[in-house]
Image: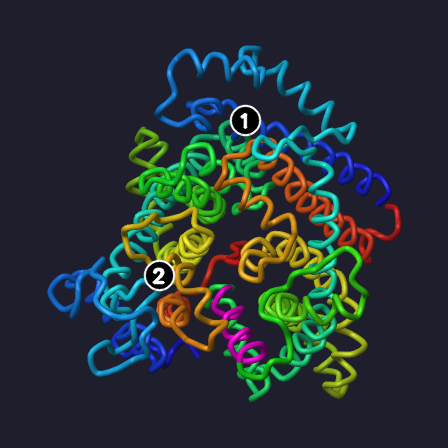
Amino acid sequence: MAIQNSFKNPPLSAKIGMVTLSVFIFFAIFAPVIAPYGEAESIGKTWASPSSEFLLGTDNIGRDMLSRIMFGARMTLGVATACTLLSFLIGITMGLLAAVAGKILDQILSRFVDLMLSIPILVFALMILSMFGSSLFTLIITIGVLDSFRVFRLARSVAVNIVVTEFVEVARLRGEGLWWIMTREVLPNALPPMIAEFGLRFCFNFLFVAGLSFLGLGIQPPFADWGGMVRENGRAIAFGIPAPLWPAIAIGLTTISVNMIVDWILSLNARPSGASAEM
Amino acid sequence: MFRLIITRVFLGFATLFAVTLLIFAATEILPGDVASAVLGQGATPDTLAAFRIELGLDRPAYVRYLEWLTNALQGDLGVAMTNKREVLDTITPRLYNTLFLAGYAAAIAVPIAIILGITAAINEGKWIDRAANIVTLGAISVPEFFIAYILILVFATNLGWFPSLSTVYSDMGFWQKIHVVALPALTLTMLVMAHMLRMTRASVLAIMSQPYIEMAFLKGLPRKRVILHHALPNAAAPIISVVALNLAYLIVGVVVIEVVFVYPGVGQYMVDGVSKRDLPVIQACALVFGSAFVLLNTIADILAILLNPRLRHPR
């Protein structure tokens, strides 16, 4: 199964995923240029149906839905990417440190992470956001830090198997420092499995940010973001108007695309044992 | 085995204790205390100080923690800041509602997920496995509110079978409740079933690759017999822990769904509390969710110990 999918020839599902994702990234970058209307521009009736003028109709205060989705791509994708990058930065650093720096630190870090994972992440995030209010900055820091515990677990479990190999031992005997061993010996070998994990964590964070925004506790107006757009237009569904479905479809398409790309990457290099992507 | 279980129960209590510490730390010790969070930026130093004394924030953190913990253990969860009502009085009926919704969803999701998961694993690579894979991947990839809105659009707006808002009263009859809560329960079912099905399939497949299964095949047993007599008895333990784990997920998964359907449960109460910065409410809800999560995880582990044939006899 893995052999026919060579690196140069991704399967159809991965190609579809890449195209869809590229479209959304294109929206995110060039939103001001290609969007037919402005982000906060109220130009039509409330919940006008799709027409040649407004391709996806208008939202609850008469803004063009398509333009809002293009602008929303910036915030939604941007925040999720920032969270995932932060979580990988912290998680990998701590995970490798735990694996390389010896038993005591490993125990302290691992037990601490076990403890932090004993509360559901949504409940934890809600508590912290209620105290700090949800500015963009606190949102990214909160989700990034909370997610880093899961990255820590995977990074540590991968690194533990690398630390016992001969070349790490040689490096230790050569007298290399902790930082050198972490970055030059362990990190390059730990990265391949982490790449697929990056996609999965991105999906998780992406859905998480969208969920928080949907609850009104994530990205705040006036910025357009997909989760918040579903919230604003939620009532339309009772009248049979599909307005909240458009941003929700955008969210779903993004996660499915990333998942399809991740599946292809996973088939290229097998996942390490003991790593779980669930929840 | 008995010792293992005792240890696990003890560990569960220790975790619960740590969870209370964590909840308290997250809400009270982090910089920028409750008083300034509630009063906002317009507060003068005088009103801030007065409010701090009113809330008892002038005392050291550990005193407040012990007081909060002993009160919570005695069933006193404090008074909500916004409406001055006892949190316990509000949260009890809501907890009942949340458990009703979760139980409803679990009653549908668990049997279907296990049967389909095993079927998919047995027919690995065939059309039923592929179909299950695509559908469940779809269900876990889209946000829960997307599934909820699709269900509302089809079953409430177009077909008119169920109401789109699940308002329940305490004096509502059981079957009436079942009818009103159908859509949120169905949404939760879709979500949890997808996770549970995938995990069940994975744990059965993990057992199918064991040497003794290969041996059973090699000695010429028919596929059906190998699965029913050799694989499934060993798959019971992982499947049951999968179920318990997913029930823990279900407890948290209710938050967004309760908000979509305006269902009066603990999740909605917590989101309300967060947007109003009502600290006792947030702490109480976090405590409820945290305890449920720890409890179900502990049960999952204990069941796994009980069902592991290798631990059944003392060495």
The answer to which of A252 and A43 lies nearer the viewer is A43
B155 within the magenta span: yes
Same subunit under labels 2 and 1? no
CA separation in Å, label 2 and label 1: 32 Å
- What is the span of residues highlighted in magenta in the rendered image? B145-157
The residue located at (57%, 87%) in the rendering is B126
Disc 1 marks a residue whose amino acid type is: Ala
Q: Where is B64 relative to B306, above or below?
A: above
Residue B240: % across, % down: 74, 61
Residue A55 found in image quarter? bottom left
Q: Is residue A99 left or right of residue A20?
A: right
Q: Residue A207 in the image: x percent, y percent?
A: 43, 58
Q: Residue furthest front?
A: A45
Which residue sits at x=41%, y=52%? A213
Task: Give the x, y percent position of residue B247.
Answer: 68, 57
Foreground pick, B4 / A164: B4
Q: Residues within 10 Å of mark 2 (few under 14, many from 20)?
A: many
**Position of A168 compared to B106: left or right?**
left
Amino acid beneath label 2: Trp
Give the residue displayed 22% in from the left and 67% down from the top: A67
On the rendered image, what quadrant is the N terminus of chain A found in? bottom left
Q: Say which element carries label 1.
A: helix
**What colour scheme was applied to this rendering of the protein?**
rainbow
Q: Work out whether A257 lies above or below A105.
A: below
Residue holding disc 1:
B25
Horizontally, residue A137 falls left or right of residue B168, namely left
Determine the main secondary structure of the stretch shown in magenta.
helix
Q: Which residue has dot 2 on it?
A: A226
Residue B179 seen anywhere in this rendered image of the structure: yes
Task: Estimate how packed mark 1 is, as few (under 14), some (14 to 19) or many (20 or more) residues with alpha carbons within 10 Å.
Answer: few
Q: Secondary structure at mark 2?
A: helix
